Amino acid sequence: MTSATAHAFNPPQLEAANLLNLVIVDDERAVRDVCREVARSLGFNTMVAESAEHTYRLLDSQAVDVVLLDLKLPGAGGIEALHKIKQRRPDAEVVVVTGYATVQSAVQAMKNGAYDYVTKPFTIDELKLLLERVAAHLKLKTENRMLREKIKSKLGFGSIVGRAPEMEKLYRMIAKAALSNHPVLILGESGTGKEMVARSIHFSGPYRDKPFIPVDCGSLVPTLIESELFGYVKGAFTGAVQAKEGLLAMAEGGTVFLDEIGELPVDLQAKLLRAIQEKEIRQVGSTKRTNINVRILAATNRDLETAVAQGTFRRDLYFRLNVLNLRIPALRERRQDIPVLAGYFLERMGRDFERERTLSDDAMKALLAYDWPGNVRELENCLQRACAMNSGPEVQVLDLPNAIHGVNIHAASEGEGSSKIVPISEMEKKTILNTITQLNGDKLLAARLLGIGKTTLYRKLKEYGSPA
């Protein structure tokens, strides 16, 4: 390899290489050093490994985009190492390095998934051109992936579905939040999709290749939250037989999403505030402080201003988290999105059940009339239940939970005239006969869905003068 000009080589950084992580795997230190200098000058974040095992450890703990792999490593075959690298990081591109005498093995490596190869001795210009090419290739892959996601998400933003004006406003806020590294407070009722919004912020931003770690503050035992967030050292408490890294440290360079932040105990709120302000943490049982570089996204369905006034949430932590504020509208506030969401869920469930599903007009009216206290999550669960109960291609109103199709019946009776009182026996008759009609005369299934015995159903039909 020609390295005499290595220290003089200082080209401008490539935009495509920025934020790409490169691992240089070679047992020769001189080769590693020169490759690292060239890669850094192009804008790569670089790591080095002198063996295959060292490489595997890096791949298991770090996000890696490119691996520069010497095919001749001590104690490991090059093709075997390539297979294990691709198993751990299928999306990473592997560039193999080989001698003149083993070009055939490099070609074999490319047939097994390597992106390209370079032969020793190589010049700095050759290495530079190769790294430029792989950086441009990865940029194109990312752009294509984002384009496919954009096409798939024409109903909304990323994996969020909805085109109501309130949602369009939310999408603009997500796009702005994704480009910053400030804390974000996501507000919304249970079931509105707060974690989905947090994921959209993370995966739409420059840190999308870094970890995203969600933490449900409401489900963790209060005595365990501190050790989960900050980690602990061996012997810190009974049962701590070995040290454990905390979630804040595990998310290094990425995002921690603190769901239901309002449930965090007040004493831990103070420790979290210090971690955010000072960008450092101290493990339970340790006196040593460790620097961290993570972005904090938090969400709650509580009124934090009221919690601050009541003394159950720290005012300073509230202001620290509330740098950016996103409110997700409740489903009842964007009813025009219900048909879009229902269609999206039914299409996805149709793939799961291998059967296309649609909604009857009455079923759609029932969905639109209901207030959805559980929001989008309740709508999804409702349609899952309906698909499980219905064996036909069309979901009927009586396939829906009683609370939902009951709203539709009430709305229908009001449509006949709000002053008209309908006897319960008449409503019962209509419900039974309509159910049998919608089920194409299947009386046993009608009885099961209505929650009555078949004998009772036949008796009722006899009273109505309908054929049993």
Image (cartoon, grey):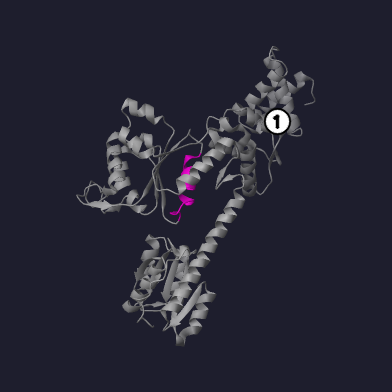
User: Magenta segment, which residues?
Assistant: 193-208
Q: Residue furthest bottom?
A: 101
Can you give x and y, in whole percent of width and height, for residue 196 in the image?
49, 44
- Residue 350, x across and y down, in percent: 65, 46
Residue position for label 1: 362
Crowding near the residue tagged with mark 1, few <14, some 14–19, many ≥20 C-alpha atoms within 10 Å: some
| Residue 451 in view in this figure | no
Is 181 placed left or right of 117 in the picture? left
Residue at x 48% of width, y 67% of height = 135
Question: Is 187 on the left or on the right of 151, as rendered?
Answer: left
Say which quadrant the N terminus sits in: bottom left
- SS class, disc 1: helix
Compared to residue 255, the image places residue 460 above or below, namely above
Majority secondary structure of the magenta segment? Answer: helix
Q: Which one is nearer the viewer's eye here, 6 or 455?
A: 6
**Amino acid on which the number 1 mark rests in the picture:** Asp
| 85 up-or-down from 397: above or below | below
Q: Quadrant of residue 28?
A: bottom left
The one of 349 and 344 positioned closer to us in this rendering: 344
Horizontal side of residue 416 vs 211, given as left or right: right
Does the magenta run of residues contain 201? yes
Q: Say if the magenta span includes residue 6.
A: no
Q: Is residue 448 above or below residue 230?
A: above
Q: Position of residue 453 (x, y in %)?
A: 66, 27
In the displayed structure, 225 sits above or below 125; it is above
Query: How far from the left and from the top, in percent, is residue 414?
Result: 68, 18
Q: Quadrant of residue 382?
A: top right
